[in-house]
Structure formats: C-alpha cells, structure tokens
Image (cartoon, coloured by chain):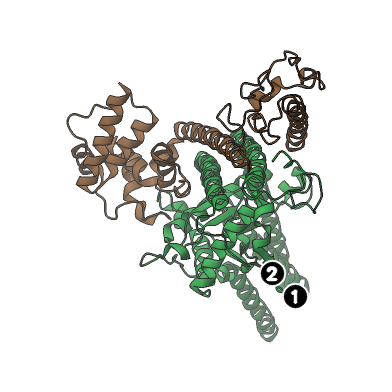
Chain colours: A green, B brown
Amino acid sequence: MIDRELRLAGAVTPLAVAVTLSAAVVLTAGAAMAQAPTKAIRAQREIPEDSLLDVGIQIFDPGLPPGDSYVLEEDLIFEDIRKSEARHIPVRLMDTLQATGQWGAVRVVPKGTRSTDLVLRGKIVESTGRKLVLEMRAADSSGREWLEKRYKQIADPRAYHDEEIDREPFQELFNQVANDLLAARDKLEPDELRAVREISELKFAAELAPVAFEDYLSVDRKGRTVAVRLPAEDDAMMERIAQIRERDYLFIDTLTDHYANFEAQMREPYDNWRKFAYDEEMAQRKIQKKARVQKILGVLAILGGVMMDGSSREKQAVREVAVIGGAMAVRVGMSKSQEVKLHLEALRELASSFDSEVAPLLVDVEGQTMRLSGSIETQYVTWRQLMRDFFIAETGLPVDPDSGEPAAAGTPTDSTLE
Amino acid sequence: MRHSAKAVTGRRIEILTLAAGVLLLTACASGGGSSSSLPSLPSPSSSPSLPSVSPPSAPSLPSPPSASLPSAPKPPSLSLPTPGGECKGGDGQGGSSGPDGAQTAEEKRASLDSEFDASLAETDRMLLQEKETLAQNRPEAMNASSSGGGSSSSGSLGGLAGAAGSAASSGGSSDGNEASSGGGGSATDASGDSNSAPVGSHSAPGSEKGTAEKDESSKRVPADIPDGRDDDIVARQLREAATSEDDPELREKLWNEYRKYKSGRG
C-alpha cells in the first residue's frame, strides 16, 4: 500500500513540476518583449545648413482592420482612439526628432503633401496601454528608401505610476526610430544630402511651373529622381518659386499647429485611457494566468483522483477529495475568466467615455485642416497660372494652353498679342 | 477655375486683337501713319480695365476715313488716334508699345508681378490670421508642457509671422516660463520634470522651482512694463520672448521692442 502511494506520489510530482514550469514560462513570456532603454542621439555640434534635411511626418494609418466598430471593439480596437493616435504619435515623434537637433524643420503633414526632403510614414499595427507596434517607412525626395521596419515596445510602467508629468510610455520606441533615421542619414555623403535638398526644391518648382522646370529632373535606372541640371542662382522664376515655398512652409507650420493643438487637447483623456487600459490589461493578464493554472491543476487533480485506487475507505476519501477539489479549482478558474470579461467591459466603457470627449475634437481638427488645405489649394491654382504667364512673358516661348507644355511650331497660342 | 480663366483670357485677347486691327486700318489708312504705331492696349492681366471692352461695345467695322469712331466705352489705357488719322506710338499715351514690343512685355511683367504680390499678400493674411486664431485657442496643456509645439519657424515671413511661428514652434520654453512666472503649481512641476520630457532641449536644465522661479521671472520684467492684461497677441508674444530670454542684452532689446509696439498701438 505504501509502495502504491509512493508510486502515485512519484507520478503526480513530475506533473506538478511540469505545471509549475509552464506557469513560470507563461508568467515570464511578457518580459521577453521588453527592450533595453534607448535614448535618442542628440547632435553634439552644429550641422551644416546644406546637410540639414526637413522631415515631414505624415498622419499615420490608424491600422483599422475591416469590420464594423462593434466587431473591432470585441478585439479591443476602438476607432476614434486609433484615429486620435494616428495624430498623437506623429506629434510625439516630431517632438523627439526636433529635440535631437539633427534635422531641419520637422513637421506633421497630411498625406499627399508637397515634396519635403524626407517623408516618414507610419501605420499603427497594435496599440494598447501596454504595447505599441508600429510599421515605419521613410524615403527621401529622390525616392531612396531610408527605413522600412516594424517597431514594438512594452510600455514603461513608470510613465503610468510615478506621477511624472509628460513622460511618454513609449518614448523609447520613438527614440529608436529617431536613431535609425539618423543612422540611415549618416550613410549618405554630404553631396548626396545636398542633392536631396536640390531635388525637393526642383520637384516643388516643377509642380508649380512644369513648363519651366520639368526637364531639370529625370529618373535613373534605379527609379530614383536625379537633378540633371540646376537653375541659375539669380533665376527669376526660382526666386518666385522660393517665395511660394515660404508660404508653403508657413501653411504646413499652421497645419502642424492644428495637430499639436489637437494632441494637447486630447492628451489628458488619452493618458487616462492608456493608464487605465494598461492597469486593466495587466490585471487581466494576471487573472488569465491564474485562471489557466487553476483549471490545469483542477483537471490534473480530477484525473489523478479518477486514476487512484479506491479499494479502501481511506483511499476512497482521498479520491473524492481530489476529484471534488479539482472540480472546484476548475470552477474557480472559470469564474476568474468571468472576471476577465468584466475588465474587458470596463475597458469598453472607458473607451466610450474617451470617444465622447475626443470625437468632437477629432472632427474639428479634420475640418480645420481640410478647410485650410482647400484654401491654399485655391492659391496654388492661381500660382500655377501665374508661373505659366511669367514663363511666357519672360521667354516669349509659346505654350500649349491645354497641356502647359511648349507648343509645337505653328500652333496658335495666346502669345500672338506680341 | 483654371480652364475658365484661360477661356476668358483667350477671348479678351481675340477682342483686343480685333480692335487693334480695326483702329489701325481706320486711323493709319487715312493718315498714312506707321503701321507699327499701335494704340496701346491693356494687357490681358489688367483685368479691371478689360470688362469695358466687351463684344457689344467693340469698335465697329471700318468706316469712311473722315468719320469718327462710334462712341463706345473705352478702357482707360486705350488711346484712340486723332481725327486726322495720325498714329501716335510709344509716347506715353497709356504706354503704347515701341517698335520691338519691349514695353508691352514690360507692362505685362509688371502686371504679373503685382498680381503675384497680391496673391502672396492674400496668402500671408490668411495664414497669419489662422496662426493668431490658433495661438489664442492654444490649450492650457500646451502652455504647461514643454512639448507639443509646432515645427520650427522656417518659412515665417517677417516680424509678425516670426513671432507667431516661434511661439507656436518653441512650445515649451516661452510658454513654460510664462506659466512659471504666473506662479502655477503645474508649471512648477512641468519645469521640474522637463528633463525627463522628450523635448528637454527647450528648458534650462536644473531650473529652480517654486518661489525661486517666480522671483527670477519677476526680475526679468522691468519696472515700467505694465501687467500686460491688455496685450494683444503680438505684445503677448514679445512679452513671453523677453521673459524667457536669458541673455540680459537680448532681453532688454526685446523689452524695447515691446515698448515700441505698445506705444505705437497707443
């Protein structure tokens, strides 16, 4: 009898050890994703003007999977929060890049903004209070790809619990992006950086005055834009283009201010949501692990009880305890699963409260930026026409009024007045 | 808009060409004047004068040389030949063209330049108005925080735009110091924690907190400067810049600019 009990104990012990080890693996799985602290590399000396590239960070793709909002909420993806984050994260990234002093003007721009030296695009793959995953791409005005990488970070818990004001939980991720951009830039020679600036300028000029500047650029075999010639330093058309470009900068500055204002207004409710979401997620994960372990142990106990020899009354009692105890453990595990659902429900409630606070701000910033973009676009139409008229007046070359290209010989044009 | 502008411009040029040809035939055929002495015509871009040259009022077909032209509303710059048929050219009557057409091109360019300048000025006005509205509606969160500012001020257009742009772009330093000079507790926390913020470069490291900060800020405001309650957006930005400036010389210059601006506004 003693031998049998010993054999049973010998059979159960490895199982218990295996379960304990599994639980340990589950508990430490999250730690595998943590990253070492990363600081953004700041410029130690002044960078020459012609090596300073301007950076345009486009509003991010919110990464909303297809499906209606109810379906998304089942996966704890909230549409308005994602759309807000699609503006919040670029502003935070802009602050990070500006703080390094490694770049020229860094702005947040809507999609389709005219040529800047370097354009940064991002997509939110996953965003909870605990974890952020972004897909980032960067390319310069010549079409050279600088970056194509997925970044992820587990939130720095100190940002939520240490009462530190304005500490971004995912700052390390932004620092890593900044450092990777810097590493890509440092691979280029100063001449190449200068060429990027020249190409940006010529692309802008060609868009405004194609008849004058289109043939300054061409595309090489790698599909990259190259400047085949440069305008004279005192080129009158380039001076006008430069004046328009100054207004374009001011327009983009103004758009960036809109996004920055929005980000500042949504920061408090967003930080509250993130903190709560982080706490809820951590609690939920704890409960889930406990529930899992409880269920596993309960099942093992039931199995063990079932397999036990119930030939004697004592053994019968032990067997019953094992089975009943195991069943109770399973029930407790299941009730913990119910707790998890309550936490999820709390998250949904908070997201709904965030929506009611931030949705009007989101509508407002989208409306303002569209209004401003529409107004400036009207000016661009006028400027394109004026550039064309200047070209005709200064060169005397006929221009096909339909295509804006120099007309073929003998084509009647509107320059017959002269 | 682009197509309609082209269509209108083309139509106007056709009418003007026709008018020039008729006048030339009428005037020069009678007086034997030079065919190159065309009356000056308004350039296509000087649109305010063009509407009066509309098809119904265009000069009529050639009439007997001694007949006067039908009276029709004429553009201010259009100079008609004298009844004697003498063709005048290039003598400043509304800028008639010279033999090589250079003056006409010059006028045209001048007209385009003024239109271009007007469009730039309109854009400046619109964007500055937008920036002022943004600055007025800037949330308190931005004033208390060293981050969340806009981009650098490249592309700003002069003093007013620069002031608006730098206030929007510097975000933390001037606004943070304004908040600290106002004595807000959150500003104290913000400045104390600024080293951990992403944009730490805007704040002076190790800046003092609380009352020491308030004393420091009050020392930066000269005694003759009023409390600024009636400051408009430009005066407020000058005040912020002066208060946050560490260099005493530059600070005094900024206060002088503030004084000049306030006295100029009355």
Q: Measure the alpha-carbon separation of dots 2 and 1.
A: 9 Å
Verify CB contact (< 8 Å) between mark 2 and mark 1.
yes
Counting from the top left corner in percent of width and height, residue A139 is at 62, 64
Quadrant of residue A336 in the image?
bottom right
Residue indicated by mark 1: A308
Quadrant location of the N terminus of chain A in the rendered image: bottom right
The vertical placement of B206 against A17, above or below, is: above
Please name the residue shown 65% across and 38% down the image: A382
Q: What's under tag 1, amino acid-wise? A: Met
Q: What's under tag 2, amino acid-wise? A: Val
The reply, left or right, for residue B4 in relation to residue B144 is right
First in residue order: circle 2 vs circle 1: 1
Please name the residue shown 77% across and 28% down the image: B25
Counting from the top left corner in percent of width and height, residue A214 is at 68, 58
Residue A41 makes an appearance in the image: yes
Marks 2 & 1 on one chain: yes
Foreground of the two, A158 or A324: A158
Task: Chain letter for mark 1, please.
Answer: A
Counting from the top left corner in percent of width and height, residue B228 is at 29, 27
Residue indicated by mark 2: A318
Which residue occupies the extreme bottom position in the image? Answer: A3
Q: Check disc 1 and report its element: helix, strand or loop.
A: loop
Please name the residue shown 74% across and 43% down the image: A69
Quadrant location of the C terminus of chain A in the rendered image: top right
